[in-house]
């Protein structure tokens, strides 16, 4: 899921909110509105929506740092792996619903 979600939210939506010609928008280009809207929509797709919004913001910041979408994908995959490890060790299965 990290690949698909990052392509959709950071690779497309975040830049589409900056310009209709999103492919020309550099991954380092920060605009508050696109940052907030894309992160909020990302968060609303998750059961823990506030945590999802914050995660979306952190993934976007990872992308902005070096201008690489791959950095957001790695951050997202790492967060998912850490959540999986937590769920598996604590048996808090509700976090995966």
Image (cartoon, rainbow, N blue to C red):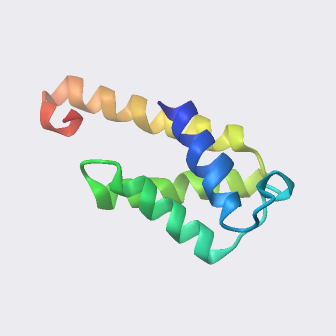
What is the x, y in percent for residue 30? Answer: 72, 69
What is the x, y in percent for residue 23? Answer: 81, 51
Q: Is residue 92 visible?
A: no
Residue 83's place in the image compared with 44, above or below, is above
What is the x, y in percent for residue 42? Answer: 44, 53
Q: Can residue 88 be seen in this view?
A: yes
- Name the residue at 38% across, 33% down: 82
Is 85 on the left or on the right of 97, as rendered? right
Is 73 on the left or on the right of 84, as rendered? right
Residue 92's place in the image compared with 33, above or below, is above
Q: In which quarter of the image is the C terminus?
A: top left
- Name the residue at 75% across, 63% down: 20
- Name the residue at 51% across, 68% down: 37
Q: Nearer the viewer, residue 82 or 42?
A: 42
Res 81 quadrant in image: top left
Is 64 on the left or on the right of 23, as rendered? left
- Name the residue at 60% across, 56% down: 60
As drawn, the residue found furthest toward the top would be 88
As drawn, the residue found furthest toward the right would be 24
As drawn, the residue found furthest toward the front would be 20
Residue 76's place in the image compared with 27, above or below, is above
């Amino acid at each position: 899921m990290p690949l698909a979600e990052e392509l959709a939210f950071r690779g497309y939506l975040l830049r589409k909110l900056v310009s209709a010609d999103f492919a020309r928008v550099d991954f380092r280009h920060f605009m508050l509105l696109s940052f907030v809207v894309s992160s909020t929509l990302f968060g609303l797709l998750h059961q823990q929506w506030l945590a999802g919004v914050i995660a979306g913001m952190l993934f976007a910041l990872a992308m902005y740092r070096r201008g690489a979408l791959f950095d957001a994908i790695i951050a997202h995959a790492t967060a998912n792996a850490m959540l999986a490890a937590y769920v598996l060790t604590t048996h808090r299965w509700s976090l995966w619903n």
